Image: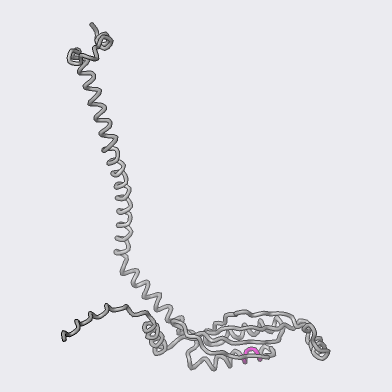
Amino acid sequence: MSFFDDLRNLDRNNVGGWPKSVKIFFATIIVVLILFFGWYLKISGQQDELEGLRKKEITLKKDFSDKQAKVVNLEAYRKQLDDMKEMLQTMLRQLPSKTEMPDLLNDISDAALGAGIETQLFQPGGEIMKDFYAEKPIQLKMLGTYHQFGTFISSVAALPRVVILTMHDVSLRPIKPAAGATKAAAAAAKEVSPDQLMLEGTVKTYRYLDDEEAAAIQRAAEAAKPKPKGKPAAKKPAEEK
């Protein structure tokens, strides 16, 4: 009798009487199922975890290589940083100093006068201290032509000290009589050359801080930092009466 005939003639109520070949067959199936479910429930999850660890290993190796490269070049980075700081200090030293600022303001005013610009307002304001420089706002109201303003800017750029002027809320417009102006004001506006422009607004110029000023600002910044709160002192037990 063949194996397939034994399968067809199995007595489900008498498992112990099954042929040996059939018993081996079903025992093999059971072992395979146990191994499959064991792999699915435990080993499969561990393989996913292993794959995640492998990816993490690749990331950690890359981070290690990057950090190692930075450590190897640390001295070069420090030298580059020192060079940049020295370059910054050199550039700052090219700005006007505290004692040169009054002369600089006079030079700017003289440059406008030399360009033929009519200065109706030139009012320097108070200095505003920053980390390593001070800025000084100047309110301007000037009357001149386009070419005169160009000459003025060229003259300022040609000053011996590095002069930085930044414009804030500055308008440059042609001269027109204001609405509702008197006849005299309108006539005066008409007498102005048609290519005359009015520059009005605020410009800022800058100077570097000397060592004493920079140290004072640094001390003030450190004093303004919130101090860590200490632990409250333990209360002494009340004395027994």
Report the number of discs: 0
Q: Residue at x 40, y 75 (%)?
A: 84
From this viewpoint, which residue is outermost toward the left? 240
In-front residue for pair 45/220: 45
- Quarter of the N terminus within the rendering: top left
Which of the 4 quarters of the picture holds residue 83?
bottom left
What colour scheme governs how the chains and residues are painted in the rendered image of this protein?
Answer: one colour
Looking at the picture, does residue 59 appear above or below residue 28? below
From this viewpoint, which residue is outermost toward the top? 1
Q: From the viewer's perspective, is 156 left or right of 32?
A: right
Q: Which is the main secondary structure of the residues drawn in magenta? A: helix
Looking at the picture, does residue 60 appear above or below residue 12? below
Which of the 4 quarters of the picture holds residue 111?
bottom right
Q: From the viewer's perspective, is 194 left or right of 229?
A: right
Q: Residue at x 37, y 71 (%)?
A: 80
Q: What stretch is highlighted in magenta?
A: 109-113
In-front residue for pair 93/202: 202
Q: Is residue 166 magenta?
A: no
> Residue 77's spot in the image, x, y percent?
35, 69
Looking at the picture, does residue 48 appear above or below residue 171? above
Q: From the viewer's perspective, is 129 left or right of 222?
A: right
In-front residue for pair 80/192: 192
